[in-house]
Amino acid sequence: MEKPTTIDEYIAAFPADVQDILQKVRETIKTAAPQATEAISYGMPTFKLAGNLVHFGAFKTHLGFYPIPSGLEQFKEELAQYKGGKGSVQFPFDQPMPYALITKIVEFRVTENLAKAAAKKKKK
């Protein structure tokens, strides 16, 4: 498979049931961060706003969600039921996707990235 260059191409490479989940996650992120731009980074769908905001990707049994460590730390209690790593969390496909939690994490990351960008501007 060729590496996708757009989120549409990325989503189209998966079975219909996974495409539905990926598209809904995409829409959830767009709603929570309407000013963010879409890209493919690290071979995954990425949203950017004053830097990388979040990444997500489909795997055999789960959706990988990458809000960087600060996004995970902020919501660690709500994410405790899911497997994860240093900067990622796994949402299993055989459980309801936590769209409301994804929204909260993305909104947190928007606030965080915009605050960092404003602080950088003040230093100049």
Image (cartoon, rainbow, N blue to C red):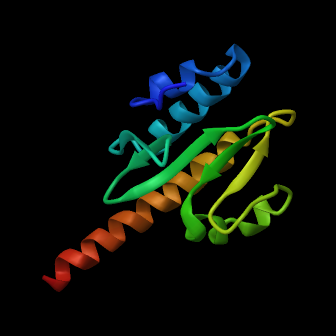
Q: Residue at x 57, y 71 (%)?
A: 70
112 to 82, vertically: above or below: below
**Location of residue 58 in the rendering, given as x and y in whole percent from the top left corner:** 66, 36
Q: Residue at x 50, y 54 (%)?
A: 107
**Location of residue 54 in the rendering, given as x and y in whole percent from the top left corner:** 50, 52
Most foreground residue, 31 or 84 = 84
Q: Is residue 116 left or right of residue 7?
A: left
11 to 46, vertically: above or below: above
Q: Residue at x 56, y 58 (%)?
A: 67
42 to 14, vertically: above or below: below
Most foreground residue, 110 or 86 = 86
Most foreground residue, 43 or 106 = 43
Q: Residue at x 34, y 64 (%)?
A: 114
Q: Is residue 118 left or right of residue 89?
A: left
Q: Residue furthest left?
A: 124
Q: Residue furthest bottom?
A: 123
Most foreground residue, 96 or 14 = 14
Quarter of image, res 1: top right
Q: Quadrant of the C terminus?
A: bottom left
Q: Is residue 78 left or right of residue 13?
A: right
**Location of residue 45 in the rendering, given as x and y in whole percent from the top left corner:** 49, 39
